[in-house]
Image: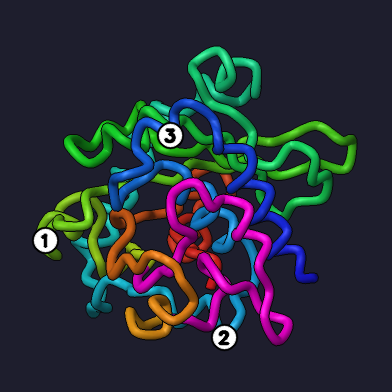
Amino acid sequence: MKRALIDVILLACALAGPLAAQHEHHADSTQMVGAADAVMSGEMSANARRHLELSPARKATHDDSVKARAVIGELRTALAKYRDTAAAVADGYRMFAPKVKQQRVYHFTNYRHAFMEAFRFDPEKPTSILYQRKPDGTLALVGAMYTMPKRASVAKLDERVPLSIARWHKHVNWCVPRPRQRERWFDVQDGHAVFGPESPIATRAECDEAGGLFFASPMGWMLHANVFAGDDLGTVFEHGH
């Protein structure tokens, strides 16, 4: 079974607690956030690409680059306090899939912040803090993942970070298990996950046939800002696919 599928299953199980239950009825259920985030952490499969929508590409201008670098400076200042993972944990962030020891990027996600991003954008309260493992075994801060409401206009996305520099992504056309059937996250057919971001199912009809729930747009826009990974704009706003 692919590591990405294992990650998604682990997440679905880990988030089967009270917070996820509170929002189980809602299309933006926070139990999906970690699964979506994790699938973006490496080379994406053909199935995963079927569930991805990117903000439109634009030709970069000098002003766009200047603005993007100003945003990087703002985010570095806001995130510097999280160089120590203990600070992230103290602020309510929890490591995704802690039992998976070898992860390309480690995500510490605050599900309250993920929920609140539907109503506001706050550089100091990202949905996820991102770390990478150093040779000595410690985790180094590389940046954060920010989210905006799925209804946010292209103009609003461009206002935050120029779309010629950074492309936001949105997960679309998900088929997920029905309430009280979380064990079905383990379902596999023809070597592929039946549900979630690695599933080949991308239409409502296919999802109905599989006995799942279909969400055309299960969550909002996301942006990876690797502001401590270097100064190159392409590296900072690299989206992992």
The foreground one among 89 and 124 is: 89
Horizontally, is 190 left or right of 62 in the view? right
Q: Is mark 1 in CB contact (under 8 Å) with mark 3? A: no
Tell whether position 46 is magenta: no
Residue 211: percent from left, percent from top: 46, 71
Indicate the quadrant where residue 47 lies. bottom right
- Mark 1 or 3 closer to N-term? 3
- For label 2, the crowd category at 10 Å Cα-Cα, with few meaning under 14, some 14 to 19 and many 20 or more, is few
- In the image, residue 108 above or below residue 175: above
Q: Amino acid at mark 3?
A: Ala
- For label 1, the crowd category at 10 Å Cα-Cα, with few meaning under 14, some 14 to 19 and many 20 or more, is few
The foreground one among 126 and 58 is: 126
Magenta portion: prevailing SS class? loop
Mark sitting on residue 4: none
Horizontally, is 52 left or right of 13 in the view? left
Q: Mark 2: which secondary structure?
A: helix
- The residue wearing badge 3 is 21
Figure colour scheme? rainbow
Mark sitting on residue 46: 2
- The residue wearing badge 1 is 153
Q: Mark 1: which secondary structure?
A: loop
Q: Mark 3: which secondary structure?
A: helix
Indicate the quadrant where residue 83 lies. top right
Magenta region: which residues?
A: 172-201
Give the residue displayed 69% in from the left and 42% down from the top: 97
- In the image, residue 182 above or below residue 131: below
Q: Nearer the viewer, mark 2 or mark 3?
A: 3
Residue 224: percent from left, percent from top: 45, 53
Give the residue displayed 46% in from the left and 30% down from the top: 110
Q: Amino acid at mark 1?
A: Ser
Give the residue displayed 42% in from the left and 75% down from the top: 51
Q: Amino acid at mark 2?
A: Ala
